[in-house]
Amino acid sequence: MTVLVGYVPTPEGEAALRAGIDEARLRGERMLVVNASRGDAYVDPRFAQEPDLAHVREDLAALGVEFDIRQVLGAGDAAEEIIELAERADVSLVVIGLRRRTAVGKLIMGSAAQRILLGAGCPVLAVKSAS
């Protein structure tokens, strides 16, 4: 089985990564770290750059966690990509980071986290950053 972590290079993504590490170690499972972007903008702060991914690799290797990192560019929707991977990759848990948003912001813009929570066929752990 696998713990899937939706990762973005933000405090919320780091919180998800830390919680995913804890869960993978507790369960004795490997981790699948997923970073996805639609690729429809020249600059996407959610798309992890090589230094971000090197940091993730170093942390996971130092902690002895078996892992795979998958970066998807041109994904139609990050939430759908995570839901589909959760179904295909024998995932026992999905871990995502939540950011603080107003109710109006969620209503107007929608929420990838909400779509993952409602659409995933396995348990989802949603975490917030300490800051």
Image (cartoon, rainbow, N blue to C red):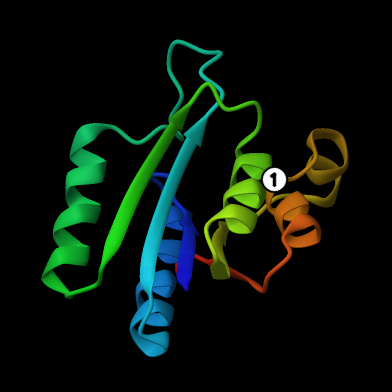
Percent across and percent down for residue 71 are 39, 37
Q: Position of residue 125 (x, y in %)?
A: 60, 72
Give residue 121's quadrant in the image. Answer: bottom right
Note whether 58 is above or below 52 in the view shown.
below
Picture quadrant of residue 54: top left
Q: In this view, does 22 lie above or below 4?
A: below
Residue type of the residue flagged with mark 1: Ala
User: Residue at 35% of width from left, 85% of height from top?
Assistant: 28
- 108 displayed left or right of 114: right
Check the image and report above or below for 48 versus 26. Answer: above
Of 109 and 56, the residue lying toward us: 56
Residue shown at 57%/65% (left/top)? 94
Residue lying at the far bottom of the rendered structure? 26
Q: Is mark 1 on a helix, strand or loop?
A: helix
Residue matched to label 1: 112
Q: Is residue 99 visible?
A: no
**Between 79 and 70, the one nearer to me in the picture:** 70
Within 10 Å of disc 1 (Cα), the crowding (few <14, some 14-19, many 20+) is some
